[in-house]
Image: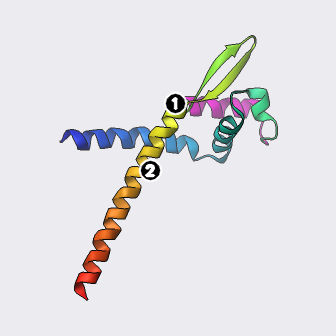
């Protein structure tokens, strides 16, 4: 297997963890809040979320497992922060997929126009 193909497979595997974590509306909302408001406690994240603090805690653990957030202890609280580098990895993967689709559409267009 070529190095390029191996790198692509690894990137897809890593991105799939991120996309799976973001596939839940509550987790996506948590990421959106952290992105918009900066680091927040579980108490603040649960305000207006429509789920319990325990549920937010479980969602944060899933996001942490995907490398999207990390926590910092401040006194008795844990403050959660977004890991923007992981979001950039997902963005690069989406850009790569988009480029592949653009190239495929370009080939199809050329083929159809050639047949005329």
The residue closer to the viewer here, 52 or 28, is 28
Residue 110's place in the image compared with 38, above or below, is: below
Q: CA distance from mark 2 to mark 1?
A: 17 Å
Magenta stretch: give its range.
50-66
Furthest-bottom residue in view? 116
Q: Estimate the x, y position of residue 38 in percent, counting from the top left.
A: 69, 31
Disc 1, SS? loop
Figure quadrant of residue 31: top right
Image quarter hosting the C terminus? bottom left
Disc 2, SS? helix
For residue 42, side relative to residue 114 (left or right): right
Furthest-left residue in view? 1
Q: Estimate the x, y position of residue 18 in percent, counting from the top left.
A: 50, 40
**Residue at x-position 63% and y-position 21%:** 71
Which mark is first along the chain, 1 or 2? Answer: 1
Furthest-top residue in view? 75
**Residue at x-position 51% and y-position 45%:** 19
Q: Estimate the x, y position of residue 108 in percent, counting from the top left.
A: 30, 73
Q: Main secondary structure of the magenta part?
A: helix
Q: Which residue is mark 2?
A: 94
The number of numbered badges drawn on the structure is 2
For residue 50, side relative to residue 36 (left or right): right
**Residue at x-position 58% and y-position 33%:** 62
Q: Which residue is mark 1?
A: 67
Q: Estimate the x, y position of residue 109 in percent, counting from the top left.
A: 32, 76
- In this view of the protein, can residue 16 be seen by the observer? no
């Amino acid at each position: 297997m070529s190095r390029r193909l191996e790198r692509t497979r690894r990137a897809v595997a890593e991105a799939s963890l991120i996309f799976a974590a973001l596939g839940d509306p509550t987790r996506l909302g948590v990421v959106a809040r952290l992105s918009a408001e900066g680091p927040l406690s579980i108490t603040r994240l649960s305000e207006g979320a429509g789920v319990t603090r325990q549920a937010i805690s479980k969602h944060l653990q899933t996001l942490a497992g995907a490398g999207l957030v990390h926590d910092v202890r401040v006194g008795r609280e844990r403050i959660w922060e977004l890991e923007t580098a992981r979001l950039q990895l997902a963005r690069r993967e989406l850009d790569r997929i988009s480029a592949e689709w653009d190239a495929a559409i370009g080939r199809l267009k050329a083929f159809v126009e050639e047949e005329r």
